[in-house]
Amino acid sequence: MRVTRPILAVVAILACLSPSAIAQEAAGPDPAAPKEPERIHKTNEEWRRLLTHDQFLVTRMGATEPAFSGRYATGHFKGTFLCVCCGAELFDSWTKFESGTGWPSFWRPVNAKALERAWDRSTPELRVEVTCARCGAHLGHVFDDGPPPTGLRYCINSLAIKLDREPARSKTTRRSTRAAKPAARKAAGAEKPSGS
């Protein structure tokens, strides 16, 4: 039986997401992880009122912002990155690294319970989607080509996160709005668009 590269990549990601790898991810500067927050459930109309158009397309409809268009795609930041929808803590800024992919990349979430993982079959290449464990917001994907110690790269849309010291509603650019609209039409047709 012939095994293709995409299948091997998926097996490698699953191996990285084993309980021991997840436990290693969870080990951070503060070993006393906070209690898991209650789940937040809102209708799409409620989310539309709370988010910008682009944030809604990415987090609720699974769209992807264009590469290198997000405010966190490059650069160094201080603080904690939160879910733009519910404010859950997702990533410490010190785990961000320059991946050159065009999206913010992190090698570990703030704790293992901050994110949920699921198969993304929206493209021919099978990927692992990451969502906010508290509100279900689409954040991006996780890949097995990151730096030590985890070897993981959480490829996250800038529109899905904000720094803890920023206002609740962030500004968007026209460029990302135009690029996200075709994805929203696709998502409205019950298909989830591909990307981060």
Image (cartoon, rainbow, N blue to C red):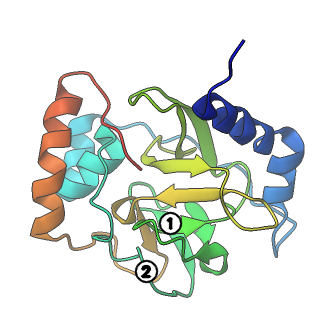
Residue 118 vertical position relative to residue 32 in the rendered view, above or below: above
Q: Is tag 1's residue or tag 2's residue first in the polypeptide sequence?
A: 2
| Residue plotted at (27% across, 56% down) | 55
Judged left or right of residue 129, residue 122 is left
SS class, disc 1: strand
Disc 2 marks which amino acid? Thr
Identify the disc placed on residue 82: 1
130 or 2: which is nearer to us? Answer: 2
| Residue plotted at (29% across, 38% down) | 61
Where residue 194 sits, quadrant-wise, is: top left
47 or 19: which is nearer to us? Answer: 19
Where residue 53 sits, quadrant-wise, is: bottom left
Residue 138 vertical position relative to residue 123 in the rendered view, above or below: below
For the question of whether residue 51 can be seen, the reply is no
Residue that extends furthest to the top in the rendered view of this protein = 1
Identify the disc placed on residue 74: 2
Image spot of residue 2 (x, y percent): 68, 18
SS class, disc 2: loop
Disc 1 marks which amino acid? Leu
Near mark 1 (Cα within 10 A), the count class, few <14, some 14-19 or many ≥20, is many
Figure quadrant of the N terminus:
top right
Judged left or right of residue 113, residue 51 is left
Residue 110 vertical position relative to residue 37 in the rendered view, above or below: below
11 or 168: which is nearer to us? Answer: 11
